Image (cartoon, helix red, strand yellow):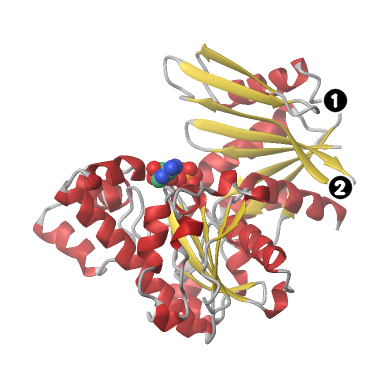
């Protein structure tokens, strides 16, 4: 059987197709349809043959809506004989609220329950729902499964998920910490246990997902017990364009003193802040390049970014009471040796010691199985760099859901 994983955004659909084999899932195709709704769109598919060779096709074409995007995907998969045995579609859904704590087979009632979460995730869930609706409309015979970014964090204890606000804001408005990037944190936590050859139940980990969006999680015995994103993905670490933590009074200050509307404040904090706000760039490679040439704003952006992560690392070590491993993942975590070194510098107090010769110039993608160990022999805490694979995790969760 084949499993298609769809990540449907407001103007793009990313996808991956996996074959389910006895020895695990095999990636057979990945692709992207983007600039949906614009005058010219773009679609791309890479096919991975059984013998390991890849072939790519790219097409510039108008993609008026998600229906057209999904049609393109299915037609391209069919053209290379990869849609013959399609059994299920796994959909990434950003917000499951308190309602969804596990991958869920989709029917009308589930769609209504996902719609009910839209007020919590107005920037993300509507596009995810569009993907679900289009898939159901065009391929009604397939089983669709929703896999939620929030689900892995459903195990947070009340002390971690409650905000110190009146209870009615929780019961009436759902105001609490939910956490995101759950598929990634869950995936790398499991892989870390395998890499350390220890049962996940015994391990206390801090997982750092550092991509364009960024979040930290404290994982105790395979369960998330604390995480940096909150009601929305805006809280916590400094991100490409999101501010992460700030005093909530900043919002009232901007509304009252700067005359900004709530929408403008939301946009500023989500799209114009973070690394971009600090130095004018949000791509970490560019910022590292600028800093290396002595650019002060770029260096400051890196300093704020690193400071925030170190603060969380210390806090989460205290939450866990012990630390067995720190795991770096996603674009920045997997690739930037300099940031990993800066984050782990002078952390003897936490038992963390990175070996420069194991870190310098190393990328997760170059390591066997996508796992690097960069700690020194005398480090009490393992420091691992693990290539995340959210789509594979979604495919696995999809299979689990349809088999349970
Ligand atoms: P997304 O959250 O969009 O999935 P990614 O996980 O792909 O993001 O991470 C994107 C970030 O990773 C960008 O800031 C990019 O600059 C950074 N990145 C990718 N490769 C490198 C690299 N070699 N060195 C430093 N940063 C990198």
Q: Which quadrant does the C terminus fall into?
A: bottom right
Q: In the drawing, does residue 398 fall left or right of residue 207?
A: right
Q: Position of residue 82 (x, y in %)?
A: 79, 25
Q: Which residue bears the numbered disc 1?
A: 84
Residue 338 vs 88, above or below: the answer is: below
Q: Position of residue 291 (x, y in %)?
A: 23, 47
Residue 92 vs 219, above or below: the answer is: above
The answer to which of marks 2 and 1 sits earlier in the sequence is 2
The number of callouts visible is: 2
Q: Nearer the viewer, residue 185 or 159?
A: 185
Q: Say which element carries label 2.
A: loop
Residue 391 vs 68, above or below: the answer is: below
Quadrant of picture, ligand 1: top left
> In the rendered image, is residue 76 in sight?
yes
Q: In the drawing, does residue 43 fall left or right of residue 294?
A: right
Q: Nearer the viewer, residue 282 or 376?
A: 376
Classify residue 5 by image quadrant: top right
Residue 195 vs 28, above or below: the answer is: below
Task: Name the residue rendered at 43%, 73% in the picture.
Answer: 313
Classify residue 250 by image quadrant: bottom left
Contact check, label 2 and label 1, Cβ < 8 Å: no
Q: Nearer the viewer, residue 351 or 144?
A: 351
Few, some or many residues within 10 Å of mark 2 (<14, 14–19, 20+):
few
Few, some or many residues within 10 Å of mark 1 (<14, 14–19, 20+):
few
Q: Which quadrant does the N terminus fall into?
A: top right
Give the residue furthest to the left. Answer: 257
Disc ID at residue 23: 2
Q: Position of residue 7 (x, y in %)?
A: 59, 40
> In the rendered image, is residue 96 in sight?
no
Q: Say which element carries label 1.
A: loop
């Amino acid at each position: 059987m084949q499993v298609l994983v769809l990540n449907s955004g407001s103007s793009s659909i990313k996808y991956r197709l996996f074959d389910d084999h006895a020895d695990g899932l095999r990636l057979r195709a990945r692709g992207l349809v983007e600039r949906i709704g614009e005058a010219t769109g773009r679609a791309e598919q890479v096919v991975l043959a059984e013998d390991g060779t890849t072939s790519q096709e790219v097409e510039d074409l108008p993609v008026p809506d998600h229906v057209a995007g999904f049609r393109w995907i299915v037609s391209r998969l069919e053209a290379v004989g990869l849609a013959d045995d399609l059994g299920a579609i796994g959909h990434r859904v950003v917000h499951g609220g308190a309602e969804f704590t596990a991958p869920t087979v989709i029917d009308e009632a589930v769609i209504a329950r996902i719609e009910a979460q839209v007020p919590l995730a107005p920037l993300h869930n509507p596009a995810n729902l569009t993907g679900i609706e289009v898939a159901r409309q065009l391929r009604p015979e397939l089983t669709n499964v929703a896999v939620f970014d929030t689900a892995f964090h459903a195990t947070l204890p009340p002390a971690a998920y409650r905000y110190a606000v009146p209870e009615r804001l929780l019961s009436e408005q759902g105001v609490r910490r939910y956490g995101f990037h759950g598929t990634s944190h869950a995936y790398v936590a499991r892989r870390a246990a395998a890499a350390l050859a220890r049962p996940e139940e015994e391990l206390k980990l801090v997982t750092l997902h550092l991509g364009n969006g960024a979040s930290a999680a404290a994982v105790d015995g395979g369960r998330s017990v604390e995480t940096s994103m909150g009601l929305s993905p805006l809280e916590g670490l400094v991100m490409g364009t999101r501010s992460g933590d700030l005093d909530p009074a900043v919002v009232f200050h901007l509304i009252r003193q700067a005359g900004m509307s709530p929408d403008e404040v939301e946009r500023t904090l989500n799209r114009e802040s973070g690394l971009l706000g600090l130095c004018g760039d949000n791509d970490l490679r560019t910022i590292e390049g600028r800093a290396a040439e002595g650019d002060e704003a770029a260096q400051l952006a890196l300093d704020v970014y690193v400071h925030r992560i170190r603060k969380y690392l210390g806090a989460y070590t205290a939450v866990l009471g012990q630390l067995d491993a720190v795991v770096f993942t996603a674009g920045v975590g997997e690739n930037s040796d300099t940031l990993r070194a800066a984050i782990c510098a002078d952390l003897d107090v936490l038992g963390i010691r990175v070996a420069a010769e194991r870190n310098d110039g190393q990328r997760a993608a170059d390591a066997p199985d996508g796992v690097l160990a960069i700690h020194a022999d005398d480090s009490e805490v393992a420091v691992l760099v693990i290539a995340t694979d959210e789509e594979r995790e979604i495919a696995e969760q999809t299979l689990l859901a349809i088999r349970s």
